[in-house]
Amino acid sequence: MKILLVDDEPDICKLIKTLVEPLGVEVRTSSDSQEAALILERDKFDGIMLDVAMPGLDGFQLARRIRSRPPNQQAPIIMLTGMDDVETMRRAFEAGVTFFLGKPVSREKIYAIFRTARGAMLAERRRTGRLPYRTAVNVSWEAQRFNSTSINISEGGMALEGSGPAVVGDVLSLEFSMPEAKHSLKVTGKIRGKDASGRTSIEFIDPTEASREIIREYMYGKITE
């Protein structure tokens, strides 16, 4: 798993990185919350740790920003804080924080929070981790229809070789086949990114549970009792 740690105290960053990485977690650090906001708009993480009191954007502001835009809108957020009063926690939850890690940081606290948060981080990794998958995709957008080809797929979205004239933010109707599926999958997706070559990143919008299950079976194999 990969997380971003945002704290303006280098000693805290070094300590947490030292304690967390033996748990099999890659830790990227940033001591500048405004720089971190830009990183979080560009790179995907399985979880985010941030301090509550920082110059620039404080922890509440950064959490709200994370929740307002991709690609980390649904990633678990752990807030580091020495302020454990109810009002601070209420503000944090309202901003989108998922878990709390109290200061001073210790090995026992780190292990405890990662036991608690690991499931949510793994779920986020499974939702966004993609496997290569190539198939024809029929795309409908406004009054237009065109054909594309998938590059990869996950529970949460897929990448296409092209999306015609549609641009970032547009909503597309997609129809494509999956191995072992009796019928084509029909899902709705929003364009989250598009590069100069036309390759397009799609985020699925509320796919049915049946569609999710078919994609899961492709990604993880069929689970039998």
Image (cartoon, helix red, strand yellow):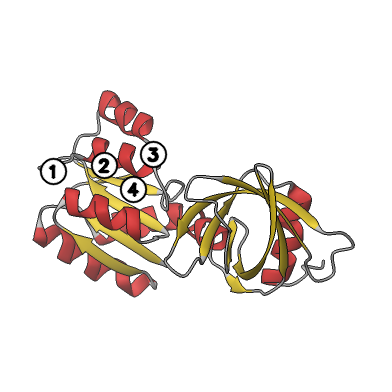
Tell me the mark number nearer the camera, choosing from 1 and 4: 1
**Residue 99 visible at all:** no
The residue at which mark 2 appears reads as 62
- Where residue 211 appears, as percent x and y from the top left, is 75, 54
**In percent of the image, x 56 and y 68: which residue is there?**
130
Who comes first in sequence, dot 3 or dot 1? Answer: 1
Query: On the image, which quarter does residue 23 sit in?
Result: bottom left
Q: Which mark is residue 54?
A: 1
Mark before the other along the chain sequence, 4 or 3: 3
Q: Is residue 49 above or below residue 107?
A: above
Give neighbour class at mark 1: few <14, some 14-19, many 20+ (Cα, 10 Å). Answer: some
Q: Looking at the image, is mark 1 or mark 4 earlier in the sequence?
A: 1
Residue hosting label 3: 68
Q: From this view, report whether residue 145 is shown above or below residue 206.
A: below
Secondary-structure class at tag 4: strand
Q: Crowding at label 3, few (<14), some or many (≥20) Cα neighbours within 10 Å? A: some
Residue drawn where x is 26% and y is 61% of the image:
107
Task: Give the left or right position of residue 225, taking residue 164 as reference.
Answer: right
